[in-house]
Image (cartoon, rainbow, N blue to C red):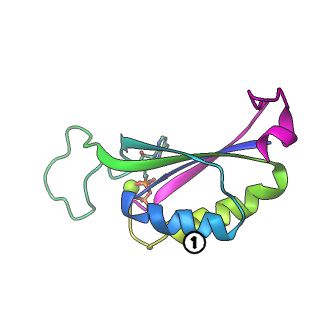
């Protein structure tokens, strides 16, 4: 099991949701977050001296998946979120140790799927 966390542009959320749906991925948690990447929140055309970071509005998705859904999920996020411009976002993938469905007590793959 993996936990896929993706930071995307807010305006890409609808497209990403549609692409995830097409990939048969329906479970997700979505947060509004603020962040910055390697431009420290300023565009590449910014000419002034950068002395601090500028936090921009982003959307974060958290999706826990069984192993066979890792690549389809990543591909769907990229398909929906890539414009080719800076700030398109980033995907983090980490091992997920446990998942428990509270209602039934099911664990692991059963609980995630
Ligand atoms: N190393 C990181 N750790 C934590 N969050 C990050 C990291 N890199 C990016 N992020 C988050 O992802 C968002 C989008 O990052 P962004 O796409 O600007 O990455 P980048 O490395 O600057 O790539 P690009 O040059 O394409 O803009 C950031 O605003 C931040 O919230
Ligand atoms: Mg950036």
Q: Where is residue 84 in the image (x, y as percent from the top left)?
A: 44, 73
Which sits in the foreground, 6 or 22? 22
Q: Where is residue 112 in the image (x, y as percent from the top left)?
A: 77, 42
Location of residue 30 with respect to 26 vertically, above or below: above
Name above or below for residue 20 compared with residue 57: below
- Number of numbered tags placed on the structure image: 1
Magenta stretch?
A: 87-113
> Does the Cβ of the disc 1 residue fall within 8 Å of ligand 1?
no
Quadrant holding ligand 2?
A: bottom left
Image spot of residue 106 (x, y percent):
85, 31
Q: In the current view of this chain or complex, which residue is farthest to the front?
A: 103
Image quadrant in which the N terminus is located: top right
Q: Where is residue 51 in the image (x, y as percent from the top left)?
A: 19, 39
**Nearer to me, 59 or 44:** 59
Q: Position of 98 compared to 86: left or right? A: right
Image quadrant in which you'd find residue 2 = top right
Circle 1 — which element?
helix
Asked if residue 91 lies in the magenta stretch, the reply is yes
Q: Is residue 19 above or below residue 35?
A: below
Q: Which residue does the image show at 40% across and 58% down from the upper left? A: 9
Q: Residues within 10 Å of mark 1 (few under 14, many from 20)?
A: some
Q: Mark 1 points at which residue?
A: 79
Q: Which residue is drawn at 80% across and 38% down?
A: 111
Q: Nearer the viewer, residue 53 or 63?
A: 63
Answer with left or right where residue 81 lies relative to residue 20: left
Magenta region includes residue 29? no
Q: Please give left or right for residue 60 compared with residue 96 in the image.
A: left
Instruction: Name the residue: 64% across, 65% down.
Output: 21
Q: Is residue 12 left or right of residue 34?
A: right
């Amino acid at each position: 099991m993996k936990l896929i966390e993706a930071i995307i542009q807010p305006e890409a959320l609808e497209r990403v949701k549609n692409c995830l749906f097409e990939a048969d991925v329906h479970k997700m948690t979505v947060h509004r977050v603020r962040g910055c990447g390697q431009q420290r929140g300023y565009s590449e055309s910014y000419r002034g001296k950068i002395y601090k970071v500028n936090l921009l509005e982003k959307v974060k998705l958290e999706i826990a998946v069984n192993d066979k859904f890792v690549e389809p999920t990543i591909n769907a996020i990229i398909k929906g979120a890539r414009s080719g411009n800076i700030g398109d976002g980033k995907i983090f993938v980490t091992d997920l140790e446990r998942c428990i469905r509270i209602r039934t007590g099911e664990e692991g793959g059963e609980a995630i799927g």
